[in-house]
Amino acid sequence: MRRLSRKKAANLVKELDAFPKVPESYVETTASGGTVSLIAFSAMALLAFFEFFVYRETWMKYDYEVDKDFSSFVLEVKVARSAPVVVGADVLDLAETMVASDGLQYEPVVFELSPQQRLWHRTLLLIQNRLREEHALQDVLFKSVLKGAPTALPPREEDPDQPLSSCRIHGHLYVNKVAGNFHITVGKAIPHPRGHAHLAALVSHDTYNFSHRIDHLSFGEEIPGIINPLDGTEKICLDHNQMFQYFITIVPTKLQTHKISAETHQYSVTERERVINHAAGSHGVSGIFMKYDISSLMVTVTEQHMPLWQFLVRLCGIIGGIFSTTGMLHGLVSFLVDVVCCRFKLGVYKPKEVRLQKIPFLSDFSADNPRVHKIQQNKRPSKAV
C-alpha cells in the first residue's frame, strides 16, 4: 500500500511538471540558431557584468522635515583681511543678543599666498565653479567625506620676508538658532544698551582696506571633505570705504552615510558689494557683513544601497528577457525567410528536375509481342539425349 501511494504521488508530481523534456532525437540544431544563442549569451554576460557595478554603487536620498531642534550651533570662520587697522568681529542676532567673540583669535599674517597656498586656492576655486554648474557633484562630496584631501589652507612652506601687514581672524562662536549678522568692521566692539558699537572715531578713512579672503566658513559640525560655498572667496577693494555683504540662508542637515553620521548645516549665499559715499547717497558702514537666516526645514541626506534581492530580481529579468526576446526574434526571422524563399522558389523550395520512366502496359505482356514469344522459347526445357 505504501509503494502504491508513493507511485501515485510520483505520477501526480510528474503530471504537474511545467517544464516537459523533449527527446534529443526531436531537437534539430541549425547554424542560425547557434549564432543567435552565442549573441544572446554574450549579451547576458555583458549586461550582468554592468549590473554588478550598478549593484555596488550607492545613491543619496533626500528627505525633508520640520526642524525641531532649537539649540545653538557653531559658527566657524577663517578670514584673512588685508589691512593694518584694528578691527573687531562679533555677532548680533535678531533678538538683539550680542554673542561674545571670545572664541575668535586675531593673528598677524601676510595676505599674499605662497606658491603652494596659491595652488590650493586655485584648485578650490575650480571645484567651486564645477559645483555651481554640476549640482550632482555634491553627492560625490557627501560620499567621499573623511576620505578626500583636507580643505583647510595649508601652512606656509617658509617664513615670509614681507612684513606682517594683515590680520587673520579664525575661531568659532556659539550662536543662537535665529537670524543674525556676523560682521567685521573697524574698531573693537563694545556692548551698548541698544545693541553694540565699534570704537572707530580715531581711525582715518584713508587707512580702511577690507580686501579679504575667506578660507573657511561653516555652520554646525565641521565635516572633513565638505566644501562650503564661501570657501576660497577672495575680494579686492577698489576703494577705501567699501562694504561687502553676504546674504546666507542656512539649512539644517543630517548626514547619514556608511562612513559618518553627523548633523551639520548647508547654506546658500548671494553677494553684494558697494562703495560707501554719503555725498552720492550710498550710506552705510565699511566692512564685511554676513547676514544669515535659518530655514525651518531640515534635510536628511541618507546614503542608500541596492538590496541583494533586488539585484537578483534584476539579474533574472535580464537573463529571461534576453532569452525570450532572442527566441521570438529568431522565430520571426526564420518565418519571414521561409515566406520569401517559398514565394520566390529559393533554397529548399527550389523545384528539382524529375526524369520520367516509361510505364509498361498490359499489351506489352501479350503473346503476340515478339519479345514475349522469344522469352517463352528460351524457357522451354531441352530434350534428353
Image (spheres, rainbow, N blue to C red):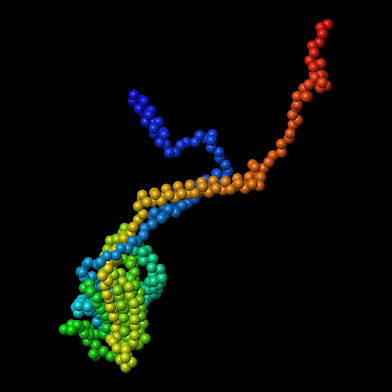
Q: Nearer the viewer, residue 345 or 162?
A: 345
Q: Report the residue at 34% width, 79% height from top.
A: 271
Q: Is residue 37 above or below residue 223?
A: above
Asked if residue 134 is positioned above or below residue 314 in the image, the reply reads below
Q: Which residue extends farthest bottom?
A: 279
Image point 24% across, 77% down: which residue?
Answer: 180
Query: Is the N terminus in the top left, top right, bottom left or bottom right quadrant?
Result: top left
Q: x, y percentage for residue 282?
A: 32, 89
What is the tally of numbered marks visible in this picture? Answer: 0
**Percent x, y of residue 265:** 28, 69
Measuring from the top left, give residue 300's x and y in whole percent.
29, 63
Q: Nearer the viewer, residue 90 or 306?
A: 306
Kindly tell me whether residue 205 is visible in this rendering: yes
Q: Quadrant of residue 274?
A: bottom left
Q: Looking at the image, which residue is at 39% across and 49% down?
A: 313
The foreground one among 377 and 301 is 377
Camera sees residue 38: no
In this rendering, would 115 be left or right of 352? left
Quarter of the rendering containing residue 205 = bottom left
- Asked whether, in this view, residue 344 is left or right of residue 108, the answer is right
Quarter occupied by the C terminus: top right
Rendered residue at 35%/80% (across/down): 235
Which corner quadrant of the image does residue 262 belong to? bottom left
- Residue 191, given in percent of the width and then of the height, sits at 18, 82
Q: In the image as oriented, which residue stretches furthest toward the top?
A: 385
